[in-house]
Image (tube, grey):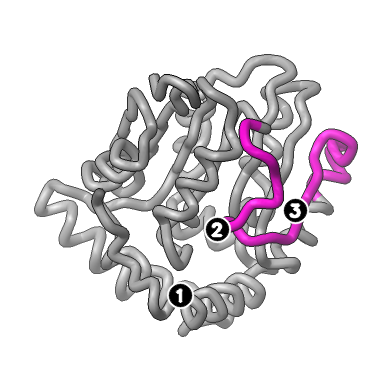
C-alpha cells in the first residue's frame, strides 16, 4: 500500500499548527481564496459538482468545510438531503454558519466542530464524502480517506478537490514562483498574515501529485478512481466509488 508522505510521528504538532493557521486566517479566507486562485476555485468546484451529479434528496458530509462554500453547493444541488459540514476550526465554522443562515439553509445543513481523521458517524451514512483544499493539511491523508470511505454508503463517492503540481515545465516554474514568493507577500499585504501564507505553499511540497493520489485512492480500496488535473495541473479532482461492503465490488 502506498504510504502518505506526511510524517505521522509529528502529526500532533502539525495538527495544532494547522489549527492555529486556519483560526487566524478565517476573517480573510474567502477573499484570499479569490485572489490567490485568480477566482478559479469557483470554476473547479463547478466542474466537480457536474462530475458528482448530486441527485435530489442525496446526503453528504463535507470535511474540512471551512467557510462552507462547497457545503452550500451540495445542499443546493440536493435540495432536501441533509448535509453535514465538519471542520476543526470554530472560527471557520462561524463564518460559514452566517452564510448558511443568510441563505436559509440552516435546517438542511448541520455544522460540527470535529476531526476529519475520526468522524462521529456510523458506517454507510452518506451518499458523498467530500474534502476541498484540505487533504494536504491533515496529519495522515490515508486515515482521512479511510474515514471518508467508511461513512459513505456502498456505491457512494469519496471526492477530493485539492491543489496539485503542474507537470508542464515552463508553467511549473512560474507557478512555484507565484506560490512560494508572491502568495506569502499578498497574504501579508491583504490579511496581515505572512507566516501563515508562507506555510500554505510549503504544505504542497510533500503532497502526492494527481497520479500518486489516484493510486492511494485505489490502494485503499476505492473503485473506478478518476483523476482530473485542472488548469494545467494547478489543482486536481479525485473521485472514488465505495464498493459493495460484502463483495468488495
Q: Which residue is mark 2?
A: 117
Magenta region: 99-124
Determine contact: label 1, label 3, CB under 8 Å: no
User: What is the magenta segment's predominant secondary structure?
Assistant: loop
Q: In 3D space, how far apart are the residues under numbered discs 1 and 3 (Cα atoms)?
A: 26 Å
Q: Secondary structure at mark 2?
A: loop
Instruction: Locate residue 5: give its quadrant.
Output: bottom left
Front residue of 151 and 111: 151
Question: For this view, does 176 lie left or right of residue 222?
Answer: left
Question: For this view, does 173 lie left or right of residue 1?
Answer: left
Q: Which residue is mark 1?
A: 11
What residue is drawn where x is 25% and y is 59%?
A: 175
Direction front: furthest residue:
246
Q: In 3D space, how far apart are the residues under numbered discs 2 and 1 (Cα atoms)?
A: 11 Å
Numbered label attached to residue 96: 3
Q: Residues within 10 Å of mark 2 (few under 14, many from 20)?
A: some
Whole-percent x, y for residue 64 in the image:
60, 55
Q: Is residue 69 located in the magenta-colored stretch of the structure?
A: no
Mark closer to the chain start, 3 or 2: 3
Instruction: Locate residue 103: give its quadrant.
Output: top right
Amino acid at each position: 500500500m502506498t504510504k502518505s508522505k506526511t510524517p505521522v510521528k509529528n502529526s500532533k504538532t502539525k495538527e495544532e499548527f494547522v489549527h492555529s493557521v486556519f483560526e487566524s486566517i478565517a476573517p480573510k479566507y474567502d477573499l484570499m481564496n479569490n485572489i490567490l486562485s485568480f477566482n478559479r476555485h469557483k470554476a473547479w468546484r463547478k466542474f466537480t459538482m457536474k462530475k458528482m451529479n448530486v441527485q435530489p434528496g442525496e446526503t453528504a458530509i463535507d470535511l474540512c468545510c471551512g467557510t462552507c462554500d462547497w457545503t452550500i453547493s451540495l445542499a443546493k444541488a440536493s435540495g432536501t438531503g441533509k448535509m453535514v459540514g465538519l471542520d476543526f476550526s470554530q472560527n471557520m465554522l462561524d463564518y460559514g454558519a452566517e452564510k448558511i443562515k443568510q441563505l436559509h439553509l440552516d435546517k438542511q445543513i448541520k455544522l460540527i466542530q470535529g476531526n476529519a481523521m475520526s468522524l462521529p458517524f456510523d458506517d454507510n451514512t452518506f451518499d458523498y464524502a467530500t474534502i476541498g483544499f484540505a487533504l494536504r493539511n491533515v496529519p495522515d491523508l490515508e486515515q482521512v480517506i479511510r474515514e471518508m470511505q467508511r461513512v459513505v454508503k456502498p456505491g457512494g463517492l469519496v471526492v477530493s478537490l485539492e491543489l496539485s503540481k503542474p507537470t508542464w515545465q515552463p508553467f511549473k516554474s512560474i507557478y512555484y514562483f507565484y506560490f512560494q514568493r508572491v502568495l506569502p507577500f499578498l497574504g501579508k499585504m491583504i490579511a496581515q498574515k505572512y507566516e501563515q501564507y508562507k506555510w500554505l505553499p510549503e504544505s504542497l511540497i510533500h503532497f502526492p501529485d494527481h497520479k500518486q493520489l489516484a493510486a492511494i485512492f485505489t490502494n485503499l480500496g476505492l473503485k473506478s478512481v478518476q483523476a482530473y488535473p485542472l488548469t494545467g495541473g494547478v489543482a486536481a479532482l479525485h473521485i472514488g466509488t465505495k464498493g459493495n461492503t460484502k463483495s468488495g465490488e
